[in-house]
Amino acid sequence: MEITKVFELISKKMSVDFELSAGFKHNGLRGDHREDVLRKFLCEGRLPKQYAIGNGEIISSYSQTSKQTDLIIYDSNKSIIFEATSTLQIFPIESVYGVIEVKSKLSKAKLIEGLDNIKSIKEIYTSTTVTKKLGKLAAASYHTNPPFGVIFAYDLGGNSLDSLRVNLSEWCRNNPPKVWPNLICILNKGIIRFSEGLKQALHSSDINDNCQISALHFNDESLFEFTSSLITLCTNREIEVFDLHNYKDNGIIIDNLRVKGANGFKDRNNGNDLRFTDAFIKEIYETCKKPIQYKELIFLTIGDQKHLEPFFADRTDPVYLYNPKNYPGMGKFSQYNVDELLTHIQNTPNITSGHHIYINDNTYYIPYAYFEDNHFQPI
């Protein structure tokens, strides 16, 4: 038997199961049942076992939370799930392959609802760079792909595929491509997806302002197209082993800046927790234009210590030094003896010691000499 025929039979059975769910008068029960039908289909061998399915909310290490999502596909081998309550699961976004919004009948209102839920997830994603060693002498780096967002519906809502395509186009004009959905499927009706020229734009990295929106009437083959696309979307996103330590220091979002390390300070008068002000963080970001290698920063701070150079030779990672007044490092004090050294360091603004913060995943070094009371605010 052809594999597409198998999917056609399954598709018909799912439609029957959905019709049965209409007998549940309570909206919550009806919603649970339609999600369970799709979950059961995917879990019965249509997705490899590493792809587990849950539901709940998605969080980021920058204190962001998505809207509640129907089905969340995550890595069962590398993920950590937090049980907020007996009915609510919390998923770190680093562990999530993507989400599926499940609708009974996809009216315009339900389409917009699903699109806004997907948007709430894609908005909290931040791209990270992963470096993997290739033997002893080589390494490869790549940027992670964002989680995908898909809408699946059992039927139309008194409309058509073409009218939904127009509705999606209107929504996309008011939202950036990075939050657009990857695929929309209406069971036994068809697929709505993006393309650029003759090339299908399925992955988030391929979806852009130049894409066109197509409504494809696959009819009985819609479930096959949906499943094939879903597997492709899952395999395109690389999931690393979850690092819980990233959530120890929750970051903050300031305009378009993702910031970590800006807190951890105490008020000297009352012991209350403080962090850098938004204005000071923006000043640091706008002042530091060009990074240097971290080993350069080390020698700027400790002075000309050639005998120590072998210990830092591999520190070629970039760092931004905040030093608008060109304060000196330890080299300025090399003429002093040990007894005089501490006094001169304490009385002369310098960059010998400081604090690191991370802005958009880049490292910034702020000498303590620049710390002023108006640079801090209560948390």
Image: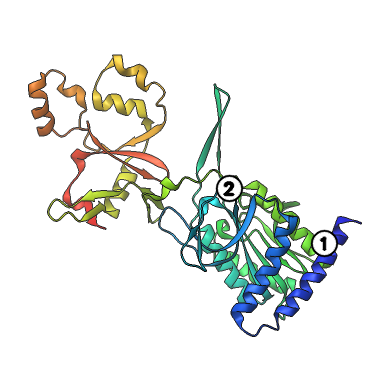
On the question of residue 79 being in view, the answer is yes
Q: Count residues near mark 1 (Cα–Cα under 10 Å), then give few for <14, some for 14-19, many for 20+.
A: some
Nearer to us of marks 1 and 2 is 1
Going from N to C along the chain, the mark reached first, 1 or 2, is 1
Above or below, 34 against 368 in this view is: below
Q: Would residue 377 appear left or right of 316 to someone viewing this image?
A: left
Colouring method of the image:
rainbow
On the image, which quarter does residue 181 sit in? bottom right
Placement of 332 over or under 319, stated as above or below: above
Q: Secondary structure at mark 2?
A: loop
Q: Secondary structure at mark 1?
A: helix
Residue 19 in the image: state x and y as whole percent.
Answer: 75, 79
Other-residue count near label 2 (Cα within 10 Å), few / some / many at <14 / 14–19 / ≥20: some
Q: Mark 2: which amino acid?
A: Asn
Tell me what residue is drawn at x 54 percent, y 63 percent: 119
Res. 366 mark: none
The residue carrying mark 2 is 145
Q: CA distance from mark 1 to mark 2?
A: 29 Å
In the image, taking residue 1 as reference, residue 192 lies left or right, namely: left
Q: Is residue 112 left or right of residue 229?
A: left
Q: Is 33 positioned to the left or the right of 92 in the image?
A: right
Q: Which residue is mark 1?
A: 7
- Picture coordinates of residue 66, whole percent (x, y): 49, 63
Residue type beneath disc 1: Phe
Residue under the point 32% across and 50% down: 282
Q: Which residue occupies the foreground of this view, 351 or 154? A: 154
